[in-house]
Image: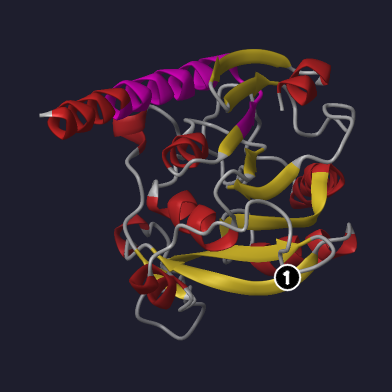
Amino acid sequence: MIDIIRRSKGKLFYQQGNTYIVLGDSRNPALFDREFIDLTITSPPYNVGLEYNSTDDEISYEDYLAFSRVWMENCYKWSKPMGRFCLNVPLDKNKGGQRSVGADLTTIAQEVGWKYHSTIIWNEGNISRRTAWGSWKSASAPYVIAPVELIVVLYKESWKKTSGSRQSDITRDEFLEWTNGLWTFNGESKKRIGHPAPFPRELPRRCIKLFSYVGDTVFDPFLGSGTTLIEAFLNQRTGIGIEIDESYAAIAKERLAAELNLFNLHSNSVSENTVK
């Protein structure tokens, strides 16, 4: 894996074992020169006007779809034949006009080569963020807003996975619960993490354990605060994240270093107790 990173057109910002943060732009088709990804998990910018440091999150919808096509096509090119793709996106949006974001991005993903498997509904249960009601208590022009997001599950060539370690680490109860396509857990606090749009660790954890084997390579083209790589590390996967903004990469690095320290402390404690 280190050879792939060295050959990358990005800059290696952080490495610890099989965990890598690369400064780069996932829109660059020359960022990597070969297939290496087993599972992509990401939540791209939603184009809803969030204040990112290095990304304009309020472009025209047409430009947003064109931007999405480029990076999804790159991820397809960099994925192995049995590669999988978990795309966390909104169901829809109403800022700047009603848009069927989830359906449009799913269509584009298929147009660049991805095959559709299923859609998981993530119920955040957070209706308090509502700021628009349309015509209040009137049939004139009400807004219907669902407090859910989508995790669209796609794959490259074959859904049945026969490559890799063939070692799954998912429990019986986890498998039964997570193959139900309605997931309910809370979102993450942007104030606590220091990033405009972090997703909760439960999201990549479930995707990693359900859709990849131990030792697989997990990739996030919009790393942000590093959540995907934290769960890849804790679940014994190789993790590679791309981040265009160095300040966000620094947040991800700090979070990963803290998790590594906690992991080492726990491992040492277990070892000492075993010896006793």
Q: Does 267 sit left or right of 223 as displayed?
A: left
Q: Is residue 170 above or below residue 119?
A: above
Number of numbered markers: 1
Residue at the (60%, 72%) spot, across then down: 119
Q: Is residue 5 above or below residue 88?
A: above
Q: The residue under label 1 is which amino acid type?
A: Lys
The magenta span reads 240-263
> Can residue 144 be seen here?
no
Name the one closer to the observer, 169 or 253.
169
Residue on which disc 1 sits: 160
Q: Is residue 12 above or below residue 100?
A: above
Magenta residue check for 253: yes
Name the one closer to the observer, 87 or 104.
87
Percent across and percent down for residue 251 are 44, 21
Q: Is residue 258 above or below residue 63?
A: above
Q: Quadrant of residue 52?
A: top right
Which quadrant does the C terminus fall into?
top left
Q: Does 109 sit left or right of 19 as displayed?
A: right
> Can residue 174 be seen here?
yes
**Predominant secondary structure, magenta span:** helix
Q: Quadrant of residue 91?
A: bottom right
Percent across and percent down for residue 95 are 57, 55
Direction front: furthest residue: 275
